Image: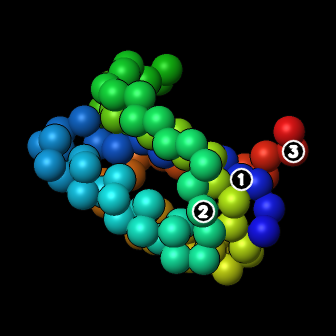
């Protein structure tokens, strides 16, 4: 397993329960074949630029260890998820 980190931005117009459900959905995907080492729900913040007429978003940062299969599944689910504005999965070299 390799070290990765993912940062994703959830739509600001979702209720707190929906935000928590989205976070738990991605945690379950990572935990199914990997392990989370650090999880940080950073809260609602202003975006650097407008994306799809949205100015704010709920930022989430997760550090985890996983296999390539977990990364592929996480990438696939994030692409088709309507709750996610943007995401980035990177391999942690530190």
Where is residue 69, by image quadrant?
Answer: bottom right
Disc 1 on helix, strand or loop? strand
Q: Are marks 3 and 2 in contact (CB under 8 Å)?
A: no
Q: Which residue is mark 2?
A: 35
- Residue 73: x percent and y percent? 56, 76
* Cα gap from disc 3 to disc 2, whole angstroms: 17 Å
- Residue 12: x percent and y percent? 25, 36
Q: Which residue is mark 3?
A: 93
Tell which of 69 and 87 is nearer to you.
Answer: 69
User: Which residue is drawn at the image coordinates 29% and 42% (left, top)?
Assistant: 11
User: Which residue is drawn at the image coordinates 64% and 54% (left, top)?
Assistant: 64
Residue 6 appears in the figure: no
Tell which of 47 and 72 is nearer to you.
Answer: 72
Disc 3 on helix, strand or loop? loop
Q: Are marks 1 and 3 in contact (CB under 8 Å)?
A: no
Disc 2 on helix, strand or loop? strand
Lateral position of residue 46 relative to residue 7, left or right:
left
Lateral position of residue 8 relative to residue 45, left or right:
right
Q: Of label 1 and label 3, which has the lower sequence position?
A: 1
- Residue 33: x percent and y percent? 60, 77
Q: Height in image: 24 above or below 92?
A: below
Q: Which residue is mark 1?
A: 4
Where is residue 47, by image quadrant?
Answer: top left
- Mark 2 or mark 1, which is nearer to you? 2
* Cα gap from disc 1 to disc 3, whole angstroms: 8 Å
Label 3, residues with CA under 10 Å away: few <14, some 14-19, many ≥20 = few
Label 1, residues with CA under 10 Å away: few <14, some 14-19, many ≥20 = many
How many circles with numbers are drawn on the protein? 3
Q: Of label 3 and label 2, which has the lower sequence position?
A: 2
């Amino acid at each position: 397993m390799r070290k990765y980190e993912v940062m994703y931005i959830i739509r600001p117009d979702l209720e707190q329960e929906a935000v928590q459900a989205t976070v738990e959905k991605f945690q379950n995907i990572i935990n199914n074949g990997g392990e989370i080492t650090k999880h940080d729900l950073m809260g609602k913040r202003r975006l650097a630029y407008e994306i799809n007429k949205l100015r704010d978003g709920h930022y989430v940062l997760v550090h985890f260890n996983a296999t390539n299969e977990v990364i592929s599944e996480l990438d696939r689910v994030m692409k088709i998820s309507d709750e996610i504005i943007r995401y980035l999965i990177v391999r942690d070299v530190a």
